[in-house]
């Protein structure tokens, strides 16, 4: 606050505290108005937020989320929502649903990113959750052989449920990504099995790297 503003407030208070006539009272009120306006104008303005759908989904699943930090979440496909080229048979999906309570599961991992844009009255705080989705699907449910691990830039989908997992780090996120990509390099993991090598098996293994 400028010295003149402090002086105005001080003088106004001093005048009001002393026995004065109407003319002095008028001057005092004017000084008080100036001082109050100065204080109001110097008060910090709340910067509005501009949130992406991904940030909104993440903050709904867990709060607080800190700028620059890495987090991971489970992503669950409700009954009837499985797609993306998944070749599981109806019997396999039913078996999974009976065991897990949902049709499919994956892991979302990423970083909270905040930035300001605009100036003055147009300034806003943008908030985003920049993340990737790791999940595994079966190629062909009729032959029960072969799987494909999927990795995408994650975008919010209202048909799927984001569930809080925990905090992690950039290096662990990178390790999990490398691990997921190499999943089918292991002979025992090349063949889909609804009980021993399914989407939940894969998701839990990726989670172990986080």
Image: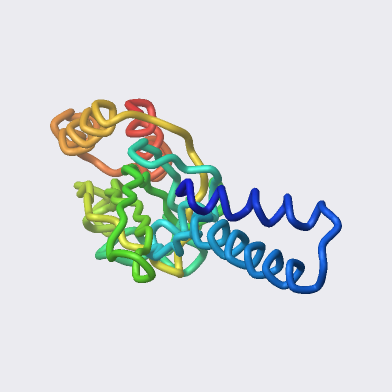
Please name the residue shown 76% across and 68% down the image. 25
User: x, y percentage for residue 191?
Assistant: 23, 40
Question: Eyeballing the image, is 55 above or below 195?
Answer: below
Question: Eyeballing the image, is 198 above or below 91?
Answer: above
Query: Along the line of sight, which residue is nearer the eye, 61 or 76?
Result: 61
Query: Along the line of sight, which residue is nearer the eye, 141 or 62?
Result: 62
Query: Along the line of sight, which residue is nearer the eye, 112 or 30?
Result: 30
User: Where on the picture, by quarter, is residue 39?
Assistant: bottom right
For the C terminus, give its image quadrant. Answer: top left
Question: Eyeballing the image, is 174 above or below 119?
Answer: above
Q: How many marks on residues? A: 0
Q: Which residue lies furthest to the right in this view?
A: 19
Image colouring: rainbow
Is residue 152 left or right of 93 when viewed as pictured?
A: left
Please name the residue shown 48% across and 53% down the image. 162
User: Where on the picture, by quarter, is residue 81?
Assistant: bottom left
User: x, y percentage for residue 147?
Assistant: 22, 47
Query: Along the line of sight, which residue is nearer the eye, 54 or 179?
Result: 54
User: x, y percentage for residue 137?
Assistant: 28, 52
Is residue 183 left or right of 202 when viewed as pictured?
A: left
Please name the residue shown 30% across and 52% down the image. 115
């Amino acid at each position: 606050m400028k010295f003149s503003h402090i002086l105005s407030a001080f003088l106004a208070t001093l005048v009001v505290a002393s026995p004065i006539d109407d003319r002095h009272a008028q001057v005092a009120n004017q000084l008080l108005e100036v001082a109050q306006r100065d204080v109001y104008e110097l008060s910090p303005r709340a910067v509005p937020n501009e949130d992406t759908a991904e940030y909104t989904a993440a903050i709904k699943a867990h709060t607080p989320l800190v700028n620059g930090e890495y987090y991971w979440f489970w992503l669950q496909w409700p009954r009837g929502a499985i797609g993306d080229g998944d070749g599981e048979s109806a019997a396999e999906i039913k078996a999974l649903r009976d065991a897990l309570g949902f049709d499919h599961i994956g892991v979302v991992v990423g970083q909270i990113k905040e930035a300001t844009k605009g100036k003055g009255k147009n300034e806003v705080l943008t908030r985003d959750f920049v993340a990737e989705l790791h999940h595994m699907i079966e190629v062909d449910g009729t032959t029960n052989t072969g799987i494909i691990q999927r990795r995408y830039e994650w975008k919010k989908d209202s048909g799927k449920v984001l569930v809080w997992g925990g905090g992690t780090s950039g290096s662990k996120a990178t390790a999990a990504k490398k691990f997921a990509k190499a999943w089918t390099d292991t002979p025992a993991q090349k063949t889909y099995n609804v009980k021993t090598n399914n989407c939940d098996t894969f998701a839990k293994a990726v989670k172990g790297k986080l």
